[in-house]
Amino acid sequence: MLPAIGSAGLSIDEVAERLASEFGADLVDVRVQEPDTVVAQVDRGRLHDVAVRLRRLDGLAYESCNFVAAVDLGSTYETLYHLYSFASNTYLELHVELPRAKPVVDTVCDVWEAANWHEREAWDMMGVRFEGHPDPRRILLKDDFVGHPLRKDYVDLVENHPHV
């Protein structure tokens, strides 16, 4: 067991245990990735509620969203949230599986403002839609770009580039 870190005075194992007990079935496969990260999965229908609760968690709040990413796993997509708790000086890596046919998940930019542009980038590059996002426009590519170039099934055609 690693020593306690952060002002909360909890070891990374204790942080994982507390998260597992506080969230029960809402956080699945909670495990430690040493030295300072807890990894867990959350159901896409529970993500927003879990995010709100994580942000307000007494003595262990995850106040900072460092990034949101989308991953094409072939048969499914996954969104990944990297959160930070100042109190425990630990990271929480949340994984949310999304069906390939409908990669949609609730936005968390109302919980963590930093998620705003990260979600827009995940939409732009991977086509994951964030339900309730206040400004779901492309952020890296031109508005008339066709497709989402980081998907495994993306084929780059001249038609995708209307101004070339």
Image (cartoon, grey):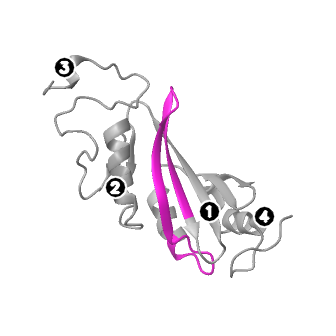
Instruction: Specify the segment rendered in magenta.
Output: 55-83
Tell me which numbered mark, 2 or 4, is placed earlier along the sequence.
4
Residue 13, labelled with which disc? 4
Whether label 4 touches label 1, CB < 8 Å = no
Tell me which numbered mark, 1 or 3, is placed earlier along the sequence.
1
Q: Residue furthest left?
A: 163
Residue displayed at 68% across by 82% down = 7
Residue displayed at 67% across by 59% down = 37
Other-residue count near label 4 (Cα within 10 Å), few / some / many at <14 / 14–19 / ≥20: many
Secondary structure under tag 1 reads strand
Q: Magenta stretch containing residue 92, yes or no? A: no
Q: Quadrant of residue 93?
A: bottom right
Whether label 3 touches label 2, CB < 8 Å = no
Q: Look at the picture and state if 127 lies above or below 34.
A: above
Horizontal relation, residue 38 to residue 151: left or right: right
Residue 159, labelled with which disc? 3
Q: Where is residue 163 in the image (x, y as percent from the top left)?
A: 13, 28
Q: Position of residue 24 (x, y in %)?
A: 65, 61
Mark-to-mark CA distance, 3 and 4: 52 Å
Mark-to-mark CA distance, 1 and 2: 20 Å
Q: Nearer the viewer, mark 3 or mark 4?
A: 3
Secondary structure under tag 3 reads helix
Whether label 2 touches label 4, CB < 8 Å = no
Amino acid type of disc 2? Trp
Mark-to-mark CA distance, 2 and 4: 32 Å
Mark-to-mark CA distance, 4 and 1: 12 Å
Q: Kindly identify which residue carries mark 1.
A: 91
Amino acid type of disc 4? Asp
Q: Which of 30 and 136 is in front in this view?
A: 136
Mark-to-mark CA distance, 1 and 3: 42 Å
